[in-house]
Image (cartoon, helix red, strand yellow):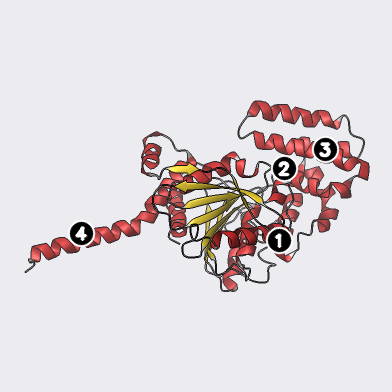
């Protein structure tokens, strides 16, 4: 017969195991944050030691209605029950973008399989409705493979403009029952509002949220998409090449300042070879002159088709049935913070299961600010909830 002491010991052990199981997602989330933020020292060493070993596989192709799209798996050690698709925003390097690779590696370190996939149009600095089709097709492909989706569900994490597009895709009838969750990391609710903000600095006001002046990268991308409306036909390609050079230089500042500075100089030198008005427009880009370039773009924003239902969650016909996670930095200057706040209310009104966090640890789409205990715990709780799905 079991003694009372034995029963008490067994009860205590069960309680500890239950607490450990419940706390596991928080521990994984904290480890993710520590490694992603590159805190360093003993804390990061402990987080690295506790993380799963990650194998980075060779790129493979994912079939879509517009052709095959490159993707890459980050495979953690041990048994994996969830695969997530991680999609970057507007960046020419695609799945080779350094911050994306680091985030995918850190995410896989928590025990989930990460597949990075870059949207071809976003790589070409264009926000198009067909990018949502690519996301839909990629999820369909992943969910159909038992090795990737044992329960027939996959997670979606979209960064920057890919965040809003991921929510649109997750609401589509063909995949809504195949999505485990969808995360919008610094994403948009309405693309028309965002492009207007990038040109004017104006955004809807909401108590507790500050709107900051827009980053010059955004208007440079808009000019690239509107070059054929801004200059004569013979100037479109030379101007576009100059803008591409500047945007690449901006991207290189994260990995190689010497190459970045050389590319910035190349973009400045290209102005000398351009006639007007292309020369003035590229000068605005090189000088990061949002105040001059933004108003010049305003009359042409309608040509971007930013109001397409496939480009914005708030214009899409349906919302996701899977949990929606909205994460946004409180000082975002590419997609204003208020976008997630407005989107969250909209989705809740439509009956969606929404979890939102506006964090002081994040700028646009990366964890790169000094941490407070409160902000760290909130961010950990957010990711713990995601990792439990």
Q: Is residue 352 left or right of residue 90?
A: left
The Cα atoms of the two marked residues, 3 and 2, are separated by 12 Å
In percent of width and height, residue 73 lies at 53, 48
Residue at image coords 19%, 61%: 12
Label 4, on which residue?
Answer: 13
In percent of width and height, residue 262 lies at 72, 26
Please rate how many residues cluster around mark 4, counting C-alpha atoms within 10 Å: few if below 14, some from 14 to 19, many from 20: few
Label 2, on which residue?
Answer: 216
In percent of width and height, residue 22 lies at 34, 59
Q: Quadrant of the C terminus?
A: bottom left
Q: Kindly state the secondary structure of the residue where label 2 is placed.
A: helix
Q: Is residue 282 above or below residue 73?
A: above
Q: Kindly state the secondary structure of the residue where label 3 is placed.
A: helix
Q: Is residue 233 left or right of residue 72?
A: right
| Marking on residue 282 | 3
Image quarter of residue 137: bottom right
Residue 207 seen by the camera: no
- Marks 3 & 1, CB-CB < 8 Å contact: no
């Amino acid at each position: 017969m079991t003694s009372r002491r034995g029963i008490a010991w067994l009860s205590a052990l069960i309680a500890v195991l239950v607490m450990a199981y419940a706390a596991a997602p928080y521990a994984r989330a904290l480890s993710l944050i520590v490694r992603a933020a590159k805190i360093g020292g003993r804390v990061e060493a402990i987080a690295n030691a506790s993380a799963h070993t990650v194998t980075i596989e060779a790129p493979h192709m994912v079939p879509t209605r517009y052709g095959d799209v490159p993707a890459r798996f980050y495979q953690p050690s041990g048994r994996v029950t969830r695969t997530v698709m991680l999609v970057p925003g507007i960046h020419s390097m695609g799945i080779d973008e350094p911050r994306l690779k680091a985030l995918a590696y850190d995410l896989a370190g928590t025990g989930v399989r990460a597949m990075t996939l870059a949207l071809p149009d976003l790589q070409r600095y264009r926000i198009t409705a067909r990018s949502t089709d690519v996301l839909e097709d990629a999820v369909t492909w992943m969910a159909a493979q038992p090795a990737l989706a044992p329960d027939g569900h996959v997670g979606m994490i979209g960064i920057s403009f890919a965040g809003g597009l991921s929510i649109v895709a997750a609401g589509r009838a063909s995949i809504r029952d195949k999505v485990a969750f969808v995360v919008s990391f610094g994403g948009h609710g309405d693309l028309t509002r965002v492009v207007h903000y990038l040109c004017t600095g104006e955004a809807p006001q909401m108590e507790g949220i500050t709107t900051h002046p827009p980053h010059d990268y955004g208007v440079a991308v808009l000019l690239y998409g509107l070059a054929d409306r801004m200059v004569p036909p013979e100037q479109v390609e030379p101007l576009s090449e100059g803008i591409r050079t500047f945007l690449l230089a901006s991207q290189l500042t994260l990995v190689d300042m010497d190459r970045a500075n050389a590319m910035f100089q190349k973009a400045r030198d290209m102005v000398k070879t351009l006639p007007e008005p292309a020369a003035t427009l590229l000068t605005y880009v090189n000088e990061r002159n949002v105040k001059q370039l933004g108003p010049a773009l305003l009359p042409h924003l309608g040509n971007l088709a930013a109001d397409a239902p496939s480009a914005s969650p708030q214009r899409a016909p349906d919302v996701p049935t899977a949990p929606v996670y909205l994460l946004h930095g409180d000082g975002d200057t590419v997609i204003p913070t208020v976008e997630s706040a407005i989107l969250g209310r909209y989705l809740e009104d439509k009956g969606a299961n929404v979890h939102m966090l506006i964090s002081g640890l994040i700028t646009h789409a990366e964890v790169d600010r000094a941490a407070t205990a409160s902000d760290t715990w909130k961010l950990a709780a957010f990711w713990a909830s995601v990792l439990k799905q």
